Image (cartoon, helix red, strand yellow):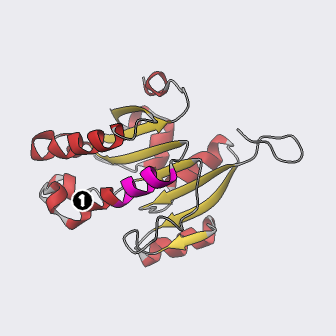
Amino acid sequence: MEHDITGRLRAIYVGTDCSGMEAPLVALRQLGIRFKHRFSCENDRHARTVLRANFAPDILYRDIRARSVCNSPEVDLYVAGFPCQSFSSAGHRMGFVDARGTIFADIFAYIARKEPRAFILENVVGLLHVQGGQCFATIVDALTKLCIYNMYWQKLNASDMVFLDIYCWNPEGLGHWFFISSADQVPWHQALS
């Protein structure tokens, strides 16, 4: 990690897509981790108002599909909670047939082009099973082909971990799927256990 001119570790650069209410940044604040909010991308205008007021990203994109990945800032940590409707029973589990499900391609394009040091992807646990597990297999295959990340994924329940309570308000107690990857040798599988 780089140091600033005072010798302290510099703040990590963070970018988020499908940003919602920026729960990952709330978690970083609560953990006392210094960060520089390079960008967010959110299509809901009410969520963008909250983002501007509480997190002031350097850049706030409205549409992940309209953004140029080439011109997007590089970050150390990239977080995306891509739309879950395509993978949940609420959205008829249409997977990549549903246009919202294809947003993963835009997320993958950012990761492949910018190669953040670490990334976290989040979705509903239905992603593991929709279309006989084929959507999940496609995601794992695409990310594995990058050949630069140590990757771990696991279903976690918000009630099991404090940071998930922050990230996923989930009154039904259903689990969420997390995919954590790092270009560094970080034992994420131990952290998730």
Query: Circle 1 sits in a helix, a strand or a loop, which is it?
Result: helix
Q: Which residue is mark 1?
A: 101
| 82 lies left or right of 190 | left
- Amino acid type at circle 1 is Gly
- Whether residue 110 appears in magenta in the rendering, the answer is yes
Q: Is residue 77 above or below residue 74?
A: above
The prevailing secondary structure element of the residues shown in magenta is helix
Q: Which residues are magenta?
A: 106-114
Dividing the image into 4 quarters, which one contains the N terminus? top right
Q: Residues within 10 Å of mark 1 (few under 14, many from 20)?
A: many
Give coordinates of residue 39: x percent, y percent: 56, 64
| Residue sitting nearer the eye, 121 or 109 | 109
Tell me if I can see residue 158 in this picture.
Answer: no
Dividing the image into 4 quarters, which one contains the C terminus? top left
| 191 lies left or right of 98 | right
Give coordinates of residue 30: x percent, y percent: 63, 45
